[in-house]
Image: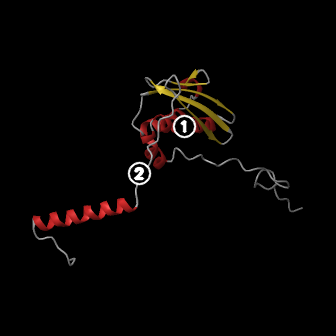
């Protein structure tokens, strides 16, 4: 047991007042007045962001809507046929609890389908933080704002691939 116990409601109230006084003094000494981030939107009410993954780059615009996602002029179901890739793209909306609230228009180039889906997810996450800055914490914790820097390792001379050696022949 600790040395200072609260025995009655009056003691509890005194302890609470003392704690509030200490907190007020600390705030006066170290002000935590952070500037609230302003939403970044264009004249049409859209937010723009760029997402990258492997060799792919995605330019993403989001605006309030019914949840339509358009990639390079095609519906997301046509462009990303595999359900796993569509799930990857929808993750930022599900984590932020904004599913079917935004329309997404994006252009993607470079790399393969997996890298392009990752680039679109990164772009959607960044665009969401520009549209609603309060979502930054949730998306940051989920890891959607970090650019995945992994890329294909280059081939080395004297090797079949990056690390694969040629088949060994004893004679």
**Mark linked to residue 56:** none
Quadrant location of the N terminus in the rendered image: bottom left
Q: How crowded is mark 1: few (under 14 residues within 10 Å), some or many (20 or more)?
A: many
Q: Residue 41 appears at what percent x and percent y?
A: 51, 30
Asked if the residue under mark 2 is in contact with the one under mark 1, i.e. CB atoms within 8 Å, the reply is: no
**Quadrant in the rendering for residue 112:** top right
Q: Residue 15 appears at what percent x and percent y?
A: 19, 67
Q: Residue at x 25, y 64 (%)?
A: 19
**Which residue lies under the disc numbered 2?**
33
In front of the other: 129 or 85: 129
Q: Residue 64 appears at what percent x and percent y?
A: 44, 25
In front of the other: 28 or 127: 28
In front of the other: 59 or 157: 59
Q: Residue at x 64, y 48 (%)?
A: 149
Q: In this view, does 126 lie to the left or right of 137?
A: right
Nearer the viewer's eye, disc 1 or disc 2?
2
Q: Is residue 91 visible?
A: no
Secondary structure under tag 2 reads: loop
Q: Residue at x 62, y 24 (%)?
A: 72
Quadrant location of the C terminus in the rendered image: bottom right
Against 15, is 63 above or below? above
Q: Is residue 28 left or right of residue 39?
A: left
In front of the other: 43 or 145: 43
**Which residue lies under the disc numbered 1?**
121
Of callouts 1 and 2, the N-terminal one:
2
Q: Distance between the residues labelled 1 and 2?
A: 32 Å
Extreme bottom residue here? 3
């Amino acid at each position: 047991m600790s040395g200072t116990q609260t025995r009655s409601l009056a003691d509890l109230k005194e302890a609470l007042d003392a704690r509030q006084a200490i907190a007020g003094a600390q705030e006066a000494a170290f002000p935590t007045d952070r500037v609230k981030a302003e939403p970044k939107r264009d004249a049409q009410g859209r937010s723009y962001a760029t997402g990258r993954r492997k060799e792919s780059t995605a330019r993403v615009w989001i605006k309030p809507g019914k949840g339509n996602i358009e990639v390079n002029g095609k519906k997301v179901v046509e462009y990303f046929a595999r359900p796993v890739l569509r799930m990857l793209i929808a993750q930022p909306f599900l984590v932020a609890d904004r599913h079917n609230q935004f329309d997404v228009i994006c252009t993607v180039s470079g790399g393969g389908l997996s890298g392009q889906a990752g680039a679109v997810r990164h772009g959607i996450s960044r665009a969401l933080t520009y549209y609603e800055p309060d979502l930054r914490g949730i998306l940051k914790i989920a890891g959607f704002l970090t650019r995945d820097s992994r890329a294909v390792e280059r081939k080395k001379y004297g090797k079949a691939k990056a690390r694969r050696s040629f088949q060994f022949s004893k004679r």
